[in-house]
Image (tube, rainbow, N blue to C red):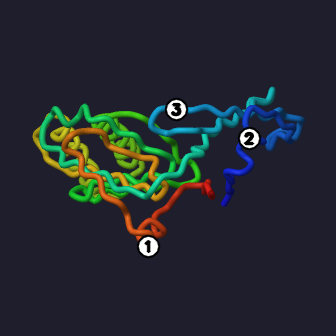
Amino acid sequence: MSEIREDNFDEIAAATAKVCCPVCRSDLEMRSHQDNIPYFGDVLSVSSVCTCGFKYAETLILTQRDPLRHTIKVCSEDHMCNRVIRSTSGTVRIPEWGIDIEPGPASEAYISNVEGVLDRIETVVNMARKWAELPEEVEKADQLLKTIGEAKSGNSEFTLIIEDPLGNSAIIGDEVKVEPLTPEYAESLHTGMFVIQK
């Protein structure tokens, strides 16, 4: 697991480094740039492109806040517009549907809304349905897709939860419940590839 420490942010911000391309082994320039993005705070963007076609891009969130859980009961079409900020360390849950989306090495941060989160889930379920080998797996996927469609129309209630041990994820809205996570529970959550230490 890689770590980025606060005391060397200035050294790695707006820098370039020579590395070896993992595909063709030629010299490759890796660039980094520090910026401030609303909701996420300070971030470090790292990217490189090789003539062989290899590309690498990563955005690391440098800010760490108190661990939080954001919960909204989605019971109308209006709730689909609530803003959702999911950092690379955020876990998304919809308990009624048995959905837990935990961060991993390829986690992406995004700013969307509740409907956008459902769109992402729908894409994954459609992909899983194509790969399904058993009839009951296809049936389960079809049922979940139907439920998602009903939810988008405001005809199926569900609870959207985002838990973030680094406190960089949120659901924005008047009806959102925000709770601190205990240190023990926060430590049990996945954080993705990078851990920020102060």
31 sits to left or right of 67: right
Few, some or many C-alpha atoms within 10 Å of disc 1 (few <14, some 14-19, many ≥20)?
A: few
Q: In the image, which disc is placed on residue 37? A: 3
Q: CA distance from mark 2 to mark 1?
A: 32 Å
Disc 3 residue type (three-letter):
Ile
What is the spatial separation of the Cα atoms under label 3 and label 2, in whole angstroms?
Answer: 17 Å
Is 46 or 117 nearer to us in this picture? 46
Nearest to N terminus: mark 3 or mark 2:
2
Q: Nearer the viewer, residue 63 or 104?
A: 63
| Above/below status of 19 relative to 134 | above
In the image, residue 182 lies at what x, y percent?
39, 68
Q: Which callout, 3 or 2, points to the residue nearer the camera?
A: 2
**Amino acid under disc 2:** Asp
Characterize the local packing of mark 2: few (<14), some (14-19) or many (20 or more) Cα atoms within 10 angstroms.
Answer: few
Secondary structure under the numbered disc 2 in the rendered image: helix
Q: Position of residue 66 (x, y in %)?
A: 45, 56
Q: How many angstroms separate mark 1 from mark 3 (CA)?
A: 29 Å
Task: Report the residue marked by disc 2.
Answer: 10
Dot 3 lies on which element?
strand
Give amino acid for label 1. Glu
Q: Earlier in the sequence, mark 2 or mark 1?
A: 2
Mark 2, mark 1: which one is toward the viewer? 2
Question: Is residue 35 visible to the viewer in this orientation of the structure?
Answer: yes
At x 74% / y 40%, what residue is drawn? 10
Q: Residue at x 40, y 40 (%)?
A: 85
Position of 53 compared to 98: left or right?
right
Evaluate if marks 3 and 2 touch, with contact meaning CB atoms under 8 Å apart: no
- Circle 1 residue: 184
Task: Single out the residue that lies furthest toward the left.
Answer: 155
